[in-house]
Amino acid sequence: MENKKIVVALGRNAFSESFPKQHERVQAAAKAIADLVEAKYDVVVTHSNGPQVGMIQTAMTEYSRLDENRTVAPMSICGAMSQGYIGYDLQNAIRSELLGRGIYKTVSSIITQVKVDPFDKAFNNPTKMIGRLMTKDEADHEREKGNYVEYEEGDEVLSKHYLMHIK
């Protein structure tokens, strides 16, 4: 009898912006996924990576500030990096959970690419912020490079800041 198939989608809040918290959440996801495998499902896992892409983009930006010869990685590369490390964490956690239950199945990670329509109307009003907080001068510099940067009022600590948006 063929196993049933299921897709598990781990959304934006499934993980965290801190490695320890992400590790904790990945362990919980691995247990739930192993339960499905134990129930005779073939499982495909897909996951969000928004906060992680922002962290990587911020790190790469800071890296480039140390030396003008170093460049910031494009968002596509930051996306692949985040898929790689989230996939690595998930793959290892799921594999360990399965082995602990005496289940010997292959667990693999795949890095994917998505092509989007640059004329999609959703790009006219970006809503998902990425990257670091910037000063006005830094924001102006990013705009000169063609990046979409938006001013936002923050809380008392962050009062005025600029954020780059996905566009």
Image: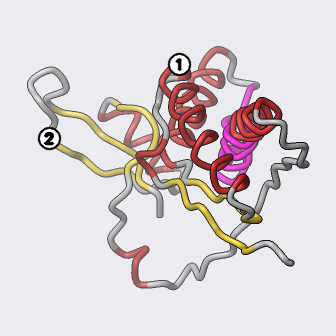
Look at the image and give the residue range highlighted in magenta. 70-87
The x, y position of residue 136, in whole percent, is 30, 35
Looking at the image, which residue is at 72% across and 52% down?
38
Looking at the image, which residue is at 59% across and 32% down?
27
Question: Relative to 115, is 133 above or below?
Answer: above
Along the line of sight, which residue is nearer the eye, 139 or 122?
A: 122
Q: Is residue 75 magenta?
A: yes
Q: Is residue 124 left or right of residue 23?
A: left
Q: Is residue 146 magenta?
A: no
- Colour scheme of the rendered structure: secondary structure
* Outermost residue toward the left in this view: 156
Along the line of sight, which residue is nearer the eye, 53 or 159?
A: 53
Along the line of sight, which residue is nearer the eye, 105 or 75?
A: 105
Question: Relative to 136, is 43 above or below?
Answer: below
Q: Secondary structure at mark 1?
A: helix
The x, y position of residue 68, in whole percent, is 68, 23
Q: Is residue 47 left or right of residue 76?
A: left
Q: Amino acid at mark 1?
A: Pro
Q: Is residue 149 left or right of residue 21?
A: left
How crowded is the residue under tag 1: few (<14 C-alpha within 10 Å), some, or many (20+)?
few
**Could you give the CA–CA distance between mark 2 and mark 1, rounded to whole angstroms?**
30 Å
Quarter assignment of residue 100:
top right
Query: Would you say the residues marked 2 and 1 are in contact, meaning their CB atoms lie under 8 Å apart?
Result: no
Q: Secondary structure at mark 2?
A: strand
Q: Nearer the viewer, mark 2 or mark 1?
A: 1
Q: Amino acid at mark 2?
A: Glu
Along the line of sight, which residue is nearer the eye, 102 or 73?
A: 102
> Can you identify the residue that label 2 sits on?
153
Question: Relative to 12, is 141 above or below?
Answer: above
> Can you identify the residue that label 1 sits on?
20
